[in-house]
Image (cartoon, rainbow, N blue to C red):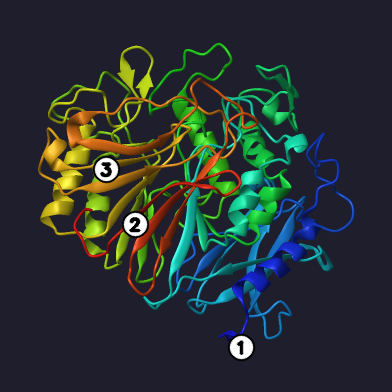
Amino acid sequence: MVQGWGGGFGRRSLLRGAAAGSGVLALPGLAVAAPALVRGGRPSAAWGVQVGDVTTSSGVVWVRSDRPARMTVQTAATESFRGARTWQGPVVGPGTDFTGVTALHGLPPGEQIHYRVLLADPDDPRRHSEPVTGTFRTAPDRRRDGIRFHWSGDLAGQGWGINPELGGYRIYEDMRRRDPDFFLCSGDNIYADNPITERVTLPDGRIWRNVTTEEKAKVAETLAEFRGAFRYNLLDENLRRFNAQVPTIIQWDDHEVHNNWYPGQLLDDDRYTVKDVNVLSARSLRAFSEYFPIRTLRPDDDAGRVYRVVRHGPLLDVFVLDMRRYRNANSPDRQTDDPQGILGAEQLRWLKRELSRSRAVWKVIAADMPLGLVVPDGAANFEAVAQGDPGAPLGRELQLAELLRHIKHQRITGTVWLTTDVHYTSAQHYAPERAAFKDFEPFWEFVSGPLNAGGFQAVKLDGTFGPAQPFIKAPDRANTSPAESPQNFGEIDIDGGSGELTVRLRQEGGEVVFSKVLQPGRVGQ
């Protein structure tokens, strides 16, 4: 067991120390090129560190080396690392693009954990890197300890990449200063189908200037190109600083591969020589598993999955969905029988089972696609759950109806849906008295994003599940740049005393544009 765990340190002072310690992550020449793999000297971890899927007693630490190296992690209660515990990680090499993870177990609940990662030459341990430090807080095991987390998605989309003149991905610094316990990224972590060019002319004549890399100069098709797309975002200092002190829960959506993709699709896109989406998605999932610390997904595990539940103490369980890998083909979506739907039959069974088992006060369902927003795919097909027919459930809506009926009849309390995808922010309340399908209890769905991508106009609502939209904030034209339209993130605060859950939709800079307080212990809201 780790010695010397204890209280007496304020979280904010610890975070200041972590921010200062992240100075070793600076990448020279960031505005023009990514750092190359250098073979001489000692290993380096210039891409920073991350921690993911943190629970009351565990987490997963990630690092990338610049050459083959043995990964070692040390954890301690203080920045001095007195009484540190050492965790031997893997030897990282080209098979995982020099990335590696180390799982931590037996950590104390509700405590600030300091960690540092060392990379050593596998043949000469004396040749090791400078330590790269980070910090995170384990989930509390007592209900009276409250929780704060953020969510958003959509990063480097539509050609809007890292712009040093605007300060890069500034929204990550806004979120870091809000001191969340973790960040839920709800998909589109990259835009594999959106190349990044050096400059883009804005409608008013201003020039947007991007950091560029060779891999992001074209659409991603090879494994190396997908890896480069994930690596691109780590060139941003705001994101690396954020990663060093805010744990993540990561899911994926379509742009990790290609816009609106589904299994079995053959692309009609002249930019691609590889047309088989199954080949592209397998390569993307491999790179995705290499570049994020996800406990159910490993590069060498073909049975790994993105969908999972992350238990964050007695107040919160986060149910992370994969609405991409198991879906049926996009279509007009009017079928009256649809067991595969958008989740696949097995994932739906898993979700119903795990929701029934959950004893958390709040069950956040992290959906990478919205429920009642009509997201088209071309002139006749649809991309998400809704298809615009306000009558009885059809197509993918049948799975949602089955799930909502299960939640009602099993008396599952405290469900809240969070999503991104549409590149604006809004709040939807669903109620049976307004709906064509009535066998469910009311619930809320909150939408945020983008983090750094084009903003888009609002889409229509589908009346099947009776949505009302008390708030929406969206641009009035397509693909407004981050220089023209504020980017968005959502914030959840769960009070440890009352159990109340407060949702705040925030925009870049931290301004609250909408808030809603939900009461615990209810089936629906």
**Which percent across, then down, holds residue 155?**
58, 37
Is residue 452 something that shows in the picture? yes
Residue bearing mark 3: 429
Asked if marks 2 and 1 touch (Cβ < 8 Å), the reply is no
Q: Which mark is residue 3?
A: 1
Q: Quadrant of the N terminus?
A: bottom right
Task: Answer above or below: position of 93 versus 147.
Answer: above
**Which percent across, then down, holds residue 268?**
47, 12
Q: Secondary structure at mark 2?
A: strand
Task: Answer above or below: position of 191 versus 94.
Answer: above
Label located before the other in sequence (2 or 1): 1
- Say which amino acid is labelled 3: His
Label located before the other in sequence (1 or 3): 1
- Say which amino acid is labelled 2: Val
Asked if marks 1 and 3 touch (Cβ < 8 Å), the reply is no
Q: CA distance from mark 2 to mark 1?
A: 40 Å
> Viewed as shown, does residue 96 lie left or right of 364?
right
Task: Answer above or below: position of 82 versus 286.
Answer: below
**Which percent across, then down, holds residue 440?**
14, 46
Instruction: Assess disc 2: are there few (<14), some (14-19) or many (≥20) residues with their C-alpha within 10 Å of its C-alpha.
Output: few
Residue at image point 27% right, 29% down:
386
Q: Secondary structure at mark 1?
A: loop
Residue bearing mark 2: 517
36 and 436: which is toward the camera = 436
245 and 59: which is toward the camera = 245
- Say which amino acid is labelled 1: Gln
Q: Secondary structure at mark 3?
A: strand
Task: Answer above or below: position of 184 versus 155.
Answer: below
Q: CA distance from mark 3 to mark 2?
A: 13 Å
Instruction: Assess disc 1: are there few (<14), some (14-19) or many (≥20) residues with their C-alpha within 10 Å of its C-alpha.
Output: few
